Image (spheres, rainbow, N blue to C red):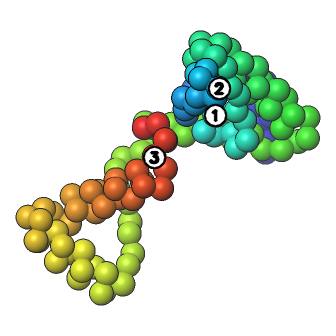
Amino acid sequence: MAIKKKKLNYYLNLNWSYTIEQETYNKKVYYIIKVNELPGICTDAESIDEGIKEIKKAIKAAIKLYLKNGELVPEPIDKKKFKGNIAYRTTAERHYLLSKLAAQENKSLSKELDFLIDVGLEHVRPHVNH
């Protein structure tokens, strides 16, 4: 069975997510807008509205290049597909330490893991939009 090739318009209509950072250079404010799903695709602008217009042009150009080169186009992740269950394997020692920490905090192991992951995510990726 042949795989149906997706067209440019399919990709342009996907719900891309952005990270927007505000920077100041020579006392002037700029916005840097990055497409989370397309590494290296970013733009800067003097306003967010202008930046969104520019980033959409950059997305279109990037997708055209992916398609021209026959490469797989990364797609946004659909939040609806996630149910909140993760199978997590670890060492007996780590399991013990996590359980001990959860008990000290009067939390369930799941709640303590969520807390630790949130802290870690914020530390590693402080500008990722949720």
Could you say where residue 116 lies in the image, as x and y percent from the top left? 30, 61
- Evaluate if marks 2 and 3 touch, with contact meaning CB atoms under 8 Å apart: no
Q: Nearer the viewer, residue 82 or 24?
A: 24
Please, what secondary structure does the residue beneath circle 1 have?
strand
Can you see residue 20?
no
Residue 108 vertical placement versus 44 (above, below): below
Q: Nearer the viewer, residue 4 or 28?
A: 28
- Evaluate if marks 3 and 1 touch, with contact meaning CB atoms under 8 Å apart: no
Q: Mark 2 or mark 1, which is nearer to you?
A: 2
What crowding class fits label 3: few (fewer than 14 Cα within 10 Å), some (14-19), or many (20 or more)?
Answer: few
Q: Residue at x 42, y 55 (%)?
A: 123
The span from disc 2 to disc 1 (Cα, nearest Å) is: 22 Å
Residue 52 vertical placement versus 80 (above, below): above
Looking at the rendering, in which quadrant would you find the N terminus? Answer: top right
- Evaluate if marks 2 and 1 touch, with contact meaning CB atoms under 8 Å apart: no
Q: Nearer the viewer, residue 32 or 7?
A: 32
What crowding class fits label 1: few (fewer than 14 Cα within 10 Å), some (14-19), or many (20 or more)?
Answer: many
Can you see residue 8?
yes
Residue behind mark 2: 26
Residue behind mark 3: 126
Could you say where residue 89 lies in the image, as x and y percent from the top left? 39, 75
Q: Residue at x 49, y 41 (%)?
A: 128
Residue behind mark 1: 34
Residue 89 vertical placement versus 11 (above, below): below
With 125 as the anchor, is 31 left or right in this view? right
The amino acid on which the numbered mark 2 sits, given as a three-letter code, is Asn
The amino acid on which the numbered mark 3 sits, given as a three-letter code, is Pro
The span from disc 3 to disc 1 (Cα, nearest Å) is: 14 Å
